[in-house]
Image (cartoon, rainbow, N blue to C red):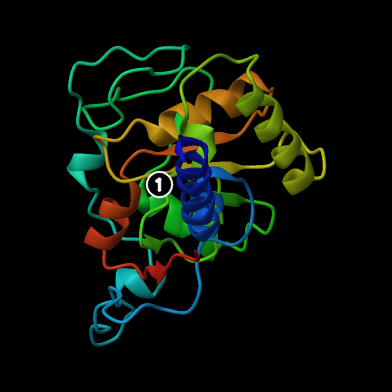
Amino acid sequence: MRADALRRVAWVALLVGGLGLEGARAQNSFGGPAPMAPATGATPAPPSPPGGSAPGAGQRSELPDPVERQDFGVAPSTELHAGAMHGPTPASIPGGRIITTNELVELRRGGAARALVFDVLGGPEALPGAVAAVPAHQPGSFNDAVQREFGRFLEQMTQGRKDTPLVFYCQSVECWMSYNASLRAIRMGYTQVLWYRGGIEAWKRAGQWVQSAAR
């Protein structure tokens, strides 16, 4: 009787695990477009002023977002962050550089076809055109399985071009997930790693469009 009960428990666990498999894949695998169609309630670009275009329509705003450059006094590190992923981040990243919302809008508007944007957050919204790379945020080492899988993924995405501009973002200036992903790419030898420190919060604050993230 006891063996039968154990078998039933195992079967239920297997069934539940199977039902949740697709959601797990969405958060724990590389690749696939993060965005789908514009979400209901997605942040629209503000109306264009007379005689010009609004920043959300692709025009560079001349007013920088001070939050994106906020210095919390956290020292930059070349090692993967192993603590809580939500918390103040450094104001620079060794081997890469911070890209602001203004710069990212300009980069995309300029038709930088080879620039790749990676969503490391895995939330309900994403930047248009972003590619899912959530597992790259994980702590560990630069010799672990995540690094190897991420390396194969980037090799495919960039077609082996180490000079491809790579943009990584997560939630905000208080999110370490994209910092870790950026460090992993830097360690692989990519020479144009752009950490979008402001994340999706800064993007929305600037009036830029967001899209529903694929699951």
Q: Quadrant of residue 154?
A: top right
Observer-nearest of 86 and 159: 86
**Is residue 41 in view from this perspective?**
yes
Name the residue at 27% across, 62% down.
204
Observer-nearest of 133 and 174: 133
Q: Position of residue 108 (x, y in %)?
A: 53, 60
Q: Position of residue 158 (x, y in %)?
A: 75, 44
Name the residue at 47% across, 28% down.
138
Observer-nearest of 146 and 54: 146
Observer-nearest of 162 and 146: 146
Q: Quadrant of residue 112?
A: bottom right
Name the residue at 56% across, 51% down.
25
Task: Give above or below for 10 relative to 174.
Answer: below
Mark 1 surroundings within 10 Å by alpha-carbon count, few (fewer than 14), some (14 through 19), many (20 or more):
many
Query: Which amino acid type corresponds to the residue marked 1 in the rendered image?
Result: Leu
Q: Secondary structure at mark 1?
A: loop
* Residue that mark 1 sits on: 121
Q: Residue furthest bottom?
A: 50
Name the residue at 36% across, 51% down.
101
Residue 148 falls left or right of residue 86: right
